[in-house]
Image (spheres, rainbow, N blue to C red):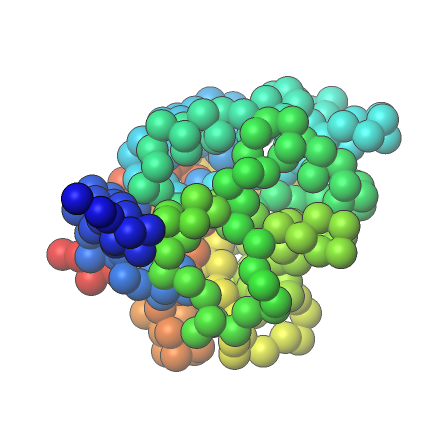
Amino acid sequence: MRINFQSLLLLASLASSAAGCNGDARLCGRKYSNVTQIGAHNSAFVGALPTQNQGLQVEGQLDMGIRFLQAQTHNLFGLGEMFMCHTSCFLLNTGPLVNYLKRINTWMEAHPNEVVTLLLTNPDKADVSIFGKAMVDSGLAKLAYTPPKKLALNEWPTLQEMINSKRRLVMFLDYYADTAKVPYILDEFAYCFETPFSQTDPNFAQCSVDRPPKASSAGRFSIINHVLDIAISDDVLIPDILGAEKTNSVASIMAQVGLCQKAHGTTPNFILLDFAERGEAIKAQNIMNHLV
């Protein structure tokens, strides 16, 4: 019996669809830009201290259904290696970026039907090549998706297409991305807008564009900062861990989503949460993706 290459590709695609894409076969045919992902804010900072934002390690976050990971990095002493530090490496340092990326790579290799998004911050203005080296050294670069050009929202591939291509990690950097140097590290604000962060209003009664400043939301992915802080003083905010169940409830998330739909005409692409394991994050994600 002869089976041509196209038939093998079709069989592989059918097998992948049967296994589901990001946990559900109904997502396989949807474009990446038409899937809502709940995200873990400051995903590398785990614990109950004021400098920590999640209760599960990154593998646990992915296991529970999180597919959008955000993390803060710093160039410790300017030595050319990024570390997972919260505000300052003297305040909280959970280790080299490359180790964090290795953990994501290990998880993704064990879960071949999952598309993951990674957003890193670069407050120290480190050269993008430093991030590229960490990606290569971790093994994660081989899974990174490289757009053939600057894509409009309707030009993104489907989850199934990304899975078939084995390029199923989308990576953004908030500042100083340069696709001429590292083509798969995308400029966050060329593709996305963010709502205001460091919110202290538990009603989240806004969905305005905060970054990039004065930008239109049209044609951009939306990143909603559904993260609640408590003001200790005028300039000190800490995560509201005790209120996380309520903040991450379907009622709270969907109330802000409704504001965003009214303001921008679309369902948000990414919604960042603190302590994502508390509350109803994945239930809300399934509602927004019309899976329930």
Residue 129 to residue 176: above or below? above
Q: Is residue 14 left or right of residue 158?
A: left
Q: How many marks?
A: 0
* Frontmost residue, 266 versus 203: 266
* Frontmost residue, 28 versus 235: 28
Determine the residue located farthest toward the right in the rendered image.
78
Q: Position of residue 157 (x, y in %)?
A: 42, 62
Q: Does residue 285 appear in this view? A: no
Q: Position of residue 147 (x, y in %)?
A: 56, 60
Point 37% across, 56% down: residue:
161
Q: Does residue 157 appear in this view? A: yes
Point 61% across, 67% down: residue:
149
Q: Position of residue 258 (x, y in %)?
A: 32, 69
Determine the residue located farthest toward the front in the rendered image.
1
Dividing the picture into quadrants, the one containing residue 91 is top right
Q: Quadrant of the C terminus?
A: bottom left
Q: Is residue 66 left or right of residue 141?
A: left
Residue 119 to residue 240: above or below? below
Q: Quadrant of the N terminus?
A: top left
Point 67% across, 35% down: residue:
73
Q: Position of residue 111 (x, y in %)?
A: 34, 33
Point 22% across, 47% down: residue:
2
